[in-house]
């Protein structure tokens, strides 16, 4: 992969999910005020961008309602210069959406790398973005946050993203802060700055500011504190003399203080083509974009589902003269390990998959009937989940078998010779904050104490809150709830080193499950009940309530 691709496609980190709603994630594309963005692929192999909403927003029911409405509206948008919304779930935990992936940098990145764009490129940009806004407005949406980072530079022209979707997040921020302005200060229209009426003309003003940024390499109204920039936008005329002369009259029309006096989108397209002259009729746009975008980056291939990987049998088949019983594979759920860089992902996945393959083959050769009985028992008894006592998909208590584990659970990999691990339920829920810590191994049951010396600590610093430990491995589980000892044991294979001792809670919400392995071999399942991290930057204002159960390795 070339250096440009290295900037675009970042490896997944330990706190990134491997799968979102069935989309296997191949790389991290970036993060913003609304959440994180990942690269994935459709079932047919087409690349898509998956945006996962921040839990602080997802915990707000008003946000979910607005997010759902904006998604419904965005589904109607079809245009050559937009990144089409193809899938979304505003009711998921956390909410997410998927758009077609555009292989190219944002306008902000392109200008940062190469400097101001030449006049023909700015005119092609204005015409393309104006056409995108026409499609967006025809669907009844006002973008409200058009800016250089929301314009992607594809090889065949610009693409406008995040149309309407950011409104839900911005309104949530308004509710929390009491501020009335919605958008990015440097690219707001005057009516936005004073919380006035928002119309399609608002996007025209932002388009002119975006074009001016492309021509100047900096915001037209300058940088500085938001209040200062907004004051300039509302009370002063922009200095257009710094812009190339051919652009000045058109941008002046678009930047009129009165929305009614601004150019229409159709006028912008026509005037841009007139200024381009013969180049417009000759279709010179693609050559301009190639010069700006540079070499096309190689998009990472789709991530292979480990359940589809097959290895050669390691146990010789029985001779025909000996009676055999056909083997049935056990119905274990497979999970993809979280990625901590490409090397860790590949190594852990291959090693874990090989271990399970060897064990299943060995069980089939030496005890096929026992495997069939285990499957039948698990199917017949709906309570035989293998979960520890007190653990469930939403943190509720399950009825446990007399030996301390769920009835019908098959033996775990690490307990094949010592028997089933003993499950210890917690006094649920347990509350973690920035003054106490969770003790997993020191005592009969897991418990919190009023010090910071325990096995697991809840901490908030830098950019949010996290679970951390000095010695225990921590992994968040994704997919179906109700993880078992076998699930955790399998996923924790290869979870070694400091990278697995600090786990950000950005992607966690009520019902999220974490597997934790103590150095003693004890394995715990932590199920989040309530996560309160919206005020993470204010000491003492955040906490985590969770159900915690432990499988004792030495029982």
Image (spheres, helix red, strand yellow):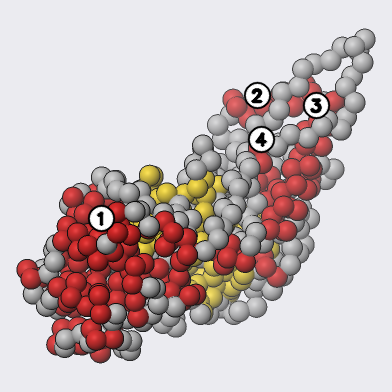
Residue at 48% in and 56% down:
103
Direction from residue 383 to residue 415 in the image, left or right: right
**Secondary structure category for the residue under label 2:** helix
The spot of residue 230 in percent (x, y) is: 22, 84
Residue at 74% in and 67% down:
497
Is 18 in front, or is 80? 80
Q: Residue furthest top?
A: 321
The spot of residue 255 in percent (x, y) is: 17, 75
Q: Where does label 1 land, which residue?
A: 131
The first of marks 4 and 3 along the sequence is 4
Is 313 in front, or is 540? 313
Direction from residue 209 to residue 467 in the image, left or right: right
The first of marks 4 and 2 along the sequence is 4
Report how far apart the C-alphas of labels 4 and 2 lie in the structure: 24 Å
Report how far apart the C-alphas of labels 1 and 3 lie in the structure: 62 Å
Residue at 35% in and 80% down:
216
Report how far apart the C-alphas of labels 3 and 2 lie in the structure: 15 Å
Q: Where does label 2 land, which residue?
A: 376
The first of marks 1 and 4 along the sequence is 1
- Would you say residue 353 is visible in this rendering? yes
Q: Say whether marks 4 and 3 touch (CB < 8 Å).
A: no
Query: In this rendering, which labeled residue sits more in front, label 4 or label 3?
Result: 4
Q: Where does label 3 land, which residue?
A: 364
Q: Where does label 4 land, which residue?
A: 308
The spot of residue 377 in percent (x, y) is: 65, 27
Q: Say whether marks 3 and 2 touch (CB < 8 Å).
A: no
**Secondary structure category for the residue under label 1:** helix
Report how far apart the C-alphas of labels 1 and 4 lie in the structure: 43 Å
Q: Residue furthest front?
A: 278
Using a 10 Å C-alpha cutoff, classify the residue at mark 2 as few (fewer than 14 neighbours), some (14 to 19) or many (20 or more).
few
């Amino acid at each position: 992969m070339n250096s440009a691709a290295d900037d675009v496609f970042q490896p997944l980190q330990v706190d990134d999910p491997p799968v979102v709603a069935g989309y296997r994630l191949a790389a991290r594309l970036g993060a913003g005020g609304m959440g994180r963005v990942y690269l994935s692929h459709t079932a047919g192999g087409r690349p898509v961008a998956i945006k996962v909403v921040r839990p602080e927003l997802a915990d707000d029911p008003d946000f979910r309602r607005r997010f759902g409405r904006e998604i419904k509206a965005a589904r109607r948008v079809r245009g050559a210069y937009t990144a089409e919304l193809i899938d979304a779930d505003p009711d998921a935990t956390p909410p997410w959406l998927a758009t077609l992936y555009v292989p190219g940098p944002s306008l902000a990145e392109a200008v940062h790398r190469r400097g101001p764009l030449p006049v023909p490129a700015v005119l092609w940009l204005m015409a393309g973005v104006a056409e995108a806004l026409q499609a967006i407005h025809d669907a009844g949406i006002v973008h409200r946050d058009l800016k250089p980072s929301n314009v992607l530079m594809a090889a065949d022209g610009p693409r406008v993203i995040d149309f309407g979707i950011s409104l839900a997040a911005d309104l949530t921020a308004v509710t929390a802060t009491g501020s009335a302005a919605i958008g990015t200060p440097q690219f707001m229209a005057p009516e936005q700055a004073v919380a006035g009426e928002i119309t399609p003309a608002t996007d025209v003003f932002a388009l002119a500011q975006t074009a001016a940024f492309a021509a100047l390499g900096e915001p037209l109204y300058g940088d500085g504190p938001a209040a200062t920039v907004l004051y300039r936008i509302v009370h002063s005329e922009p200095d257009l003399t710094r812009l190339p002369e051919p652009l000045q009259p058109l941008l002046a029309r678009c930047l009129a203080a009165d929305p009614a006096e601004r150019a229409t989108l159709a006028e912008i397209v026509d005037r841009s083509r007139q200024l381009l002259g013969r180049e417009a009729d000759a279709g010179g746009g693609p050559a301009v974009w190639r010069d700006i975008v540079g070499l096309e980056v190689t998009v990472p291939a789709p991530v292979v589902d480990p359940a589809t990987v097959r290895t050669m049998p390691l146990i010789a088949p029985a001779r025909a003269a000996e009676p055999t019983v056909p083997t049935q594979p056990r119905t274990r759920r497979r999970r993809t390990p979280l990625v901590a860089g490409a090397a860790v992902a590949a190594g852990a996945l291959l090693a874990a998959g090989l271990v399970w393959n060897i064990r299943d083959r060995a069980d089939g050769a030496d005890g096929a009937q026992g495997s069939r009985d285990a499957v039948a028992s698990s199917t017949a008894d709906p309570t035989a989940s293998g979960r520890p006592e007190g653990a469930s998909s939403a943190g509720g208590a399950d009825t446990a078998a007399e030996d301390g584990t769920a009835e019908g659970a098959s033996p775990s990999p690490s307990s094949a010779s010592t028997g089933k691990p003993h499950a210890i339920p917690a006094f649920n829920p347990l509350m973690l904050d920035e003054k106490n810590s969770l003790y997993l191994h020191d005592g009969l049951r897991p418990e919190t104490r009023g010090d910071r010396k325990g096995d697991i600590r809840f901490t908030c610093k830098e950019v949010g809150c996290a679970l951390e430990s000095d010695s225990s491995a921590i992994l968040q589980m994704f997919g179906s709830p109700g993880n078992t000892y076998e699930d955790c044991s399998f996923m924790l294979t290869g979870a070694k080193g400091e990278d697995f001792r600090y786990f950000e809670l950005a992607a966690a919400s009520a019902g999220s499950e974490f597997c934790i392995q103590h150095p003693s071999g004890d394995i715990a399942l932590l199920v989040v009940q309530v996560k309160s991290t919206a005020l993470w930057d204010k000491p003492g204002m955040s906490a985590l309530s969770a159900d915690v159960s432990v499988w004792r390795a030495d029982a």
